[in-house]
Image (tube, rainbow, N blue to C red):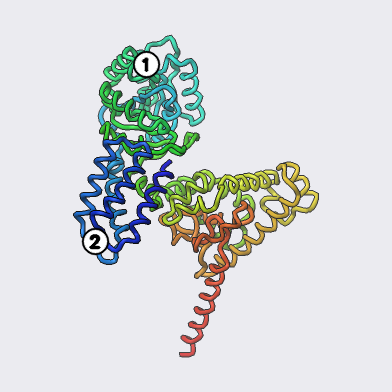
């Protein structure tokens, strides 16, 4: 979402990097570009003025530390102000008090309230709560059915509303049912309405007065930019919103709503929708988003994504299989699914410090992801026995696999050949204590960036398997997501020889 803004700000900082020291003139020039970048990103003009004034005052009033360039000093100030602008720190849901707690979802029609209700319910269940969905939208024919369908998908209880019921009656009966089922949180999916429609806004006020929700979350489409902020302000004046959910944050919107909404309404952004899947809702962290905008990456979110996809004991089991060269195509397919569930390659690269611009340098990442899809199709066409023992795949089996996956026999041959090369390389690199690159990192850290967190280092051999051969090792990252570069392997061999010579000298002594 913030790609355009991030590029513009990077250009500003590159200009400052050539300066020997900070002065009022070069700060003024830089802030002029920052102001234009924010306005182009559709940030509220009053917010832009306050932001640039704050940055100017801090930048001029701060002594440049030794060993820190003017550009780095300004980046520090801009980062601090961006974090403040986005809300300062993560804001938790306040669900204390009566049980079950009640969350009221409000917003315009088409902003994504129903889908966001399902996503929020799934997220709360992961946090050990017992959510209960309540369809209160009696005006849109398919709204009730849509929420009930989503509830079935994620196996969360949902009240059986009907269009002829009144909203207040629905809520009263839903609260009674939720108590019987021992649910702890009710999520009310209200009808979409325009802030200028007094009749529907009065109805929303009546719903609020009856339900007395602990949280009133305004669901805004991030693609609407400043319009979302204007509408949120109107809703806030009528019902007093306590937080915001921004949907479609994975789109190509300019990000103005996310940067303006806290300053204008006073209500913090609490959650963001990052995709169409029900699992793709994230808690909003202002400091992490600021880091993404400034190209600093977001390692913590990357770690959380990896940890949610693979358990520690599963990662350890996979590491042992790789060490014994028992890593097979079934394991590879599992790891490929894990990685794809974390998001697109470009989104993952942007979370890794220093690699924010790599995605654009590599060109069309969708082409690489399409190749991964083809690889997965080939593996899916194999029997379990073939996936566990690739060496049994003879010419007749290859023809069957190719026909089943809609590919060519050459593609199957290429997959098998490169998988075998990858497996041998893994065994060699993980067999030594000094093995770098393919070492499985712990669940508590990136393990020196030797591979993806959470045991996803096994993806390091996708050079040919996923069509990512041109990526090499990405500057010593140990093969994400390409094979480890030759320089990495060479360095490992030199280290082994050096350690061996050192042991011999110690023995002689």
Query: Dot 2: what SS?
Result: loop
Query: Dot 1: what SS?
Result: helix
The residue that appears at 42% across and 27% down in the rendered structure is 111
Q: Mark 2 or mark 1, which has the lower sequence index?
A: 2
Question: Which of the two discs, 2 and 1, sits closer to the camera?
Answer: 2
Residue 409 falls left or right of residue 189: right
Q: How many marks?
A: 2
Mark 1 highlights which residue? 173
Q: Residues within 10 Å of mark 1 (few under 14, many from 20)?
A: some
Q: Nearer the viewer, residue 30 or 286?
A: 30
Quadrant, the N terminus: top left
Give residue 305's position: percent from left, percent from top.
45, 46
Residues under labels 2 and 1: Cα distance?
A: 63 Å
Mark 2 highlights which residue? 64
Residue 47 falls left or right of residue 186: left
Give residue 509's position: percent from left, percent from top.
45, 90
- From this viewpoint, which residue is outermost toward the right? 396
The reply to whether residue 317 is visible in this rendering is: no
C-beta proximity under 8 Å, tags 2 and 1: no
- From this viewpoint, which residue is outermost toward the left? 61
Give residue 358's position: percent from left, percent from top.
49, 54
The residue that appears at 63% across and 46% down in the rendered structure is 376
The residue that appears at 26% across and 36% down in the rendered structure is 46
Q: Nearer the viewer, residue 477 or 362?
A: 362
Q: Residues within 10 Å of mark 2 (few under 14, many from 20)?
A: some
Q: Nearer the viewer, residue 460 or 485?
A: 485
498 in relation to 71, above or below: below
């Amino acid at each position: 979402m913030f790609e355009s803004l991030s590029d513009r700000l990077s250009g500003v900082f590159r200009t400052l990097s050539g300066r020997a020291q900070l002065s009022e003139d070069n700060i003024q020039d830089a802030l002029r570009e920052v102001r234009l970048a924010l306005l182009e990103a559709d940030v509220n003009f009053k917010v832009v003025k306050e932001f640039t004034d704050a940055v100017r005052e801090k930048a001029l009033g701060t002594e440049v530390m030794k060993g820190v360039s003017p550009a780095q000093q300004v980046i520090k100030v801009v980062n601090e102000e961006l974090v403040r602008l986005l809300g300062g720190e993560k804001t938790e849901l306040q669900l204390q008090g009566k049980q079950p707690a009640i969350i009221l979802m409000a917003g315009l029609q088409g902003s994504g309230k129903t889908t966001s209700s399902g996503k929020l319910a799934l997220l709360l269940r992961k946090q050990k709560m017992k959510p209960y969905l309540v369809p209160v939208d009696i005006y849109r024919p398919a709204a009730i059915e849509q929420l009930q369908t989503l509830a079935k998908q994620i196996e969360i209880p949902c009240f059986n509303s009907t269009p002829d019921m009144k909203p207040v009656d629905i809520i009263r009966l839903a609260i009674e049912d939720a108590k019987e089922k021992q649910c702890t949180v009710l999520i009310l999916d209200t009808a979409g309405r325009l802030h200028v429609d007094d009749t529907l806004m009065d109805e929303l006020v009546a719903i609020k007065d009856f339900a007395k929700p602990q949280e009133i979350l305004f669901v805004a489409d991030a693609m609407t930019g400043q319009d979302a902020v204007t509408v949120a302000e109107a809703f806030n004046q009528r019902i007093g919103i306590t937080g915001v959910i921004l949907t479609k944050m994975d789109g190509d919107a300019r990000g103005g709503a996310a940067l303006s909404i806290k300053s204008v309404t006073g209500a913090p952004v609490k959650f963001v929708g990052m995709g169409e899947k029900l699992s793709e809702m994230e808690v909003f962290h202002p400091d992490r988003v600021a880091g993404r905008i400034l190209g600093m990456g977001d390692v913590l979110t990357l770690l959380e994504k990896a940890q949610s996809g693979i358990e520690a004991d599963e990662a350890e089991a996979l590491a042992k299989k790789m060490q014994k060269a028992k890593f097979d195509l079934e394991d590879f397919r599992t790891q490929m699914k894990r990685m794809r569930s974390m998001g697109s390659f470009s989104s993952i690269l942007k979370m890794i410090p220093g690699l924010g611009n790599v995605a654009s340098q590599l060109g069309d990442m969708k082409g690489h992801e399409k190749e991964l899809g083809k690889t997965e199709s080939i593996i899916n066409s194999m029997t379990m026995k073939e996936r566990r023992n690739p060496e049994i795949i003879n010419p007749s089996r290859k023809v069957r696999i190719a026909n089943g996956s809609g590919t060519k026999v050459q593609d199957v041959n290429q997959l098998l050949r490169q998988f075998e090369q990858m497996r041998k390389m893994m065994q060699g690199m993980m067999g030594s204590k000094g093995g770098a690159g393919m070492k499985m990192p712990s669940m508590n850290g990136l393990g020196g960036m030797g591979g993806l967190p959470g045991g996803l280092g096994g993806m390091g051999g996708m050079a040919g398997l996923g069509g990512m051969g041109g990526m090499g090792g990405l500057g010593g990252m140990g093969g994400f997501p390409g094979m480890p570069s030759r320089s990495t392997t060479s360095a490992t061999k030199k280290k082994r020889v050096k350690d061996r010579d050192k042991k011999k000298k110690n023995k002689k002594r």
